[in-house]
């Protein structure tokens, strides 16, 4: 489970770098796939899977409480997406994109920080493990 969270952290790092260097790649992909039901379903499933994964794997991290908090936050976000429905999801995302584009580099920095935190949180110091 630690490996899955670390891989998610690496993915967040890469997405953050992409948002810093060339944000239109991610933003245009979202805009082009807005009408697909798969985007909505993927948004829910990914949040549920990672929410459960974070909660289960939290005890293996350096920051159990913080990781569990993010896990519950992911699950709450998935539940909210289920209740708002696909049409409201599309409307929300399409109205949000023009407001977010100017802040893409800041979002990239936050994604890099979050990815780095996840990698650090699930990397144990060998000296600490021996004690």
Image (cartoon, rainbow, N blue to C red):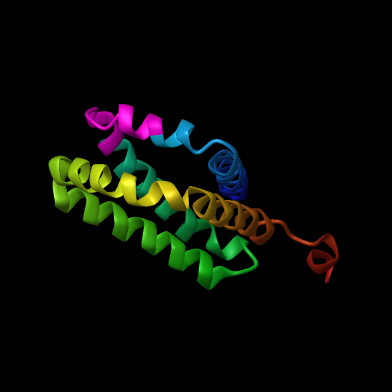
Q: Specify whether 118 is left or right of 78.
A: right
Q: Specify whether 36 is left or right of 5.
A: left
Q: Specify whether 8 is left or right of 38.
A: right
| Residue located 56% across and 49% down the image | 5
Q: Quadrant of the C terminus?
A: bottom right
> Would you say residue 35 sits in the magenta stretch?
yes
| Residue located 46% across and 53% down the image | 103
Q: Which residues are magenta?
A: 28-40
The picture places residue 118, in percent across and down from the top left corner, at 60, 56
| Residue located 56% across and 69% down the image | 64
Q: Quadrant of residue 10?
A: top right
The picture places residue 46, in percent across and down from the top left corner, at 38, 43
Q: Quadrant of residue 80?
A: bottom left
The picture places residue 99, in percent across and down from the top left corner, at 33, 51
Name the residue nearer the viewer: 1 or 78. Answer: 78
| Residue located 37% across and 62% down the image | 73
Q: Is residue 114 above or below residue 12?
A: below
Name the residue nearer the viewer: 25 or 56. Answer: 25
Q: Specify whether 94 is left or right of 105.
A: left
């Amino acid at each position: 489970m630690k490996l899955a969270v670390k891989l998610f952290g690496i993915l967040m790092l890469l997405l953050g770098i992409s948002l810093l260097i060339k944000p239109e790649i991610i933003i245009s992909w979202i805009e082009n796939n807005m009408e697909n039901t798969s985007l909505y379903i993927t948004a829910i499933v990914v949040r549920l899977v990672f929410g459960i994964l974070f909660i289960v794997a939290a005890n293996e991290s350096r920051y159990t409480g913080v990781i569990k908090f993010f896990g519950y936050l992911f699950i709450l976000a998935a539940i909210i997406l289920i209740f708002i429905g696909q049409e409201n999801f599309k409307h929300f995302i399409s109205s949000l994109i023009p407001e977010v584009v100017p802040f893409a580099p800041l979002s990239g920095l936050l994604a890099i920080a979050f990815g780095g935190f996840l990698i650090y949180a699930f990397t144990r110091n060998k000296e600490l493990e021996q004690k």
